[in-house]
Image: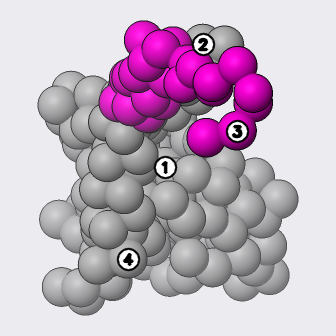
Amino acid sequence: MLRKICNVISGLLAVVLLALAGVLIVPYLMGYTELAVLTGSMQPTLPVGTLIYVKEVEPETLQVGDVVTYRLDSDTMVTHRVVEIDPDAQTLTTQGDANSDPDGAITFDRLVGKMDFYIPYLGYISLNIRTPIGIMSICGALIFIILLAFIPEIFSKDEEESKDKPAKELPPDGKE
């Protein structure tokens, strides 16, 4: 019974870790940039903590209403909806869904790409998995899965040893 419980728990943990790895790694291998939404400027469409997948596109293919990511500076990216495109000036204007004013003109060379899809709240995991605590958590989960494989073996050996030992016989008078 203990073996079945440990197998089920380790199987579930392995499936969760593999699914998480698949969601975080496979899109990256397919050329997507993964970004976590850090502010509420795109709510309710993209709640804080949403993981978005952005793919590089030619600016000429964009349409009003597309959600795009652009570089604000070398370290900061912004994801907002396109509200206007000026192909002659090679700029686009974006605005967050929750914002009352547009961001202003953004040159095409600052464009990172267009959002293809997103997974709400997975951005929290994506952000935290790269921290020392996140790395220790993943390592801890893997160690726990390995331990679950050995726990039934440890307890079954103790049970076998107690079954193999002959019961101590008492003398006929019942005293030692």
Q: Residue at x 50, y 82 (%)?
A: 104
Give the structural element (helix, strand or loop) at label 4. helix
Going by the numbered disc 4, the residue's amino acid type is: Ile
Task: State the image coordinates of residue 25 (x, y, percent, origin top left).
Answer: 26, 36
Placement of the N terminus among the 4 image quadrants? top right
Task: State the image coordinates of residue 136 (x, y, percent, origin top left).
Answer: 32, 68
**Magenta span contains residue 158:** yes
Quickly name the residue at label 3.
175
Quickly name the residue at label 4.
133
Camera-nearest label, 4 or 1:
4
In screen coordinates, is 141 left or right of 56?
Answer: right
User: Whole-Å distance between the Cαs marked 3 and 1?
Assistant: 77 Å
Q: Residue at x 57, y 51 (%)?
A: 122
Front-lying residue, 114 or 52: 52
Task: State the image coordinates of residue 74 (x, y, percent, origin top left).
Answer: 18, 85
Q: Residue at x 67, y 48 (%)?
A: 120
Placement of the C terminus among the 4 image quadrants? top right
The circle on residue 52 is 1
**Marks 4 and 3, the one that precedes in the sequence:** 4
Task: State the image coordinates of residue 150 (x, y, percent, origin top left).
Answer: 35, 30
Going by the numbered disc 3, the residue's amino acid type is: Lys
Q: Residue at x 54, y 24 (%)?
A: 168
Quickly name the residue at label 2.
4
Q: Give the total of numbered labels.
A: 4
Check the image and report above or below for 140 versus 56.
Answer: below
Q: Quadrant of residue 157?
A: top left
Give the structural element (helix, strand or loop) at label 2. helix
User: Whole-Å distance between the Cαs marked 4 and 1?
Assistant: 23 Å
